[in-house]
Amino acid sequence: QVQLVESGGGSVQTGGSLRLSCAAAGLTYTSCMAWFRQAPGKEREGVAGIDGGRVFYGDSVKGRFTISKDNAQNTLYLQMPRLIPEDTAMYYCAARRGVGCYSWNWGRPSDYTDWGQGTQVTVSS
């Protein structure tokens, strides 16, 4: 059974930084992992994904956020500098098995088989 546990969320002011972590237990397959976020009243949005040497970013965070993965520790990270109020959302870690991630499919929430419970990020102006 796969268990994904996010941590690192919190409340910061505009321009602040946070680093999210996702500890993956029971992850016996090697496949794509990603961060999604969902703000109240909005659809779940792909923030960043990673599959082996391939990394992907949503347009709103490209050039700001950095996704990385420590395979030895089975932990996924999201470094978030220069935060803005529009980044406020619940952030979720997700993993998928079977189909790899590519630029045209990494951001589809329905393709992911395992999800964490989420960690809240709030950015105040």
Image: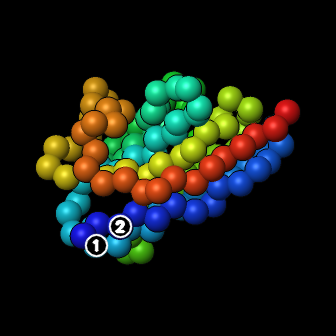
Note whether 15 is above or below 18 in the view shown. Answer: above
- Residue located 74% across and 32% down the image: 85
In this rendering, position of residue 26 left or right of residue 23 = left
x and y percentages locating residue 60 in the rendered image: 57, 26
Q: Residue furthest front?
A: 41
Note whether residue 95 is visible: yes
Note whether 57 is above or below 78 in the view shown. Answer: above
Note whether residue 63 is visible: no
- Residue located 63% across and 50% down the image: 120
Query: Which amino acid, by three-letter code, is at mark 1?
Result: Gly
Snapshot quadrant of residue 89: top right
SS at badge 2: strand
| Of pointers 1 and 2, the one earlier in the residue sequence | 2
Quarter of the figure that contains the N terminus: bottom left
- Residues at marks 1 and 2 touching, judged by CB atoms closer than 8 Å: yes
In this rendering, position of residue 110 left or right of residue 8 = left
Q: Which residue is mark 1?
A: 26
Q: Which residue is mark 2?
A: 3
- Residue located 24% across and 39% down the image: 111
Residue toward you, 103 or 87: 87
User: What colour scheme does the image use?
Assistant: rainbow
Query: Which amino acid, by three-letter code, is at mark 2?
Result: Gln
How many residues crowd around disc 2 within 10 Å: few (fewer than 14), some, or many (20 or more)? some
User: How much space separates mark 1 and mark 2, taking CA atoms?
Assistant: 6 Å
How many residues crowd around disc 1 within 10 Å: few (fewer than 14), some, or many (20 or more)? few
Quarter of the figure that contains the C terminus: top right
x and y percentages locating residue 105 in the rendered image: 27, 31
Snapshot quadrant of residue 55: top left
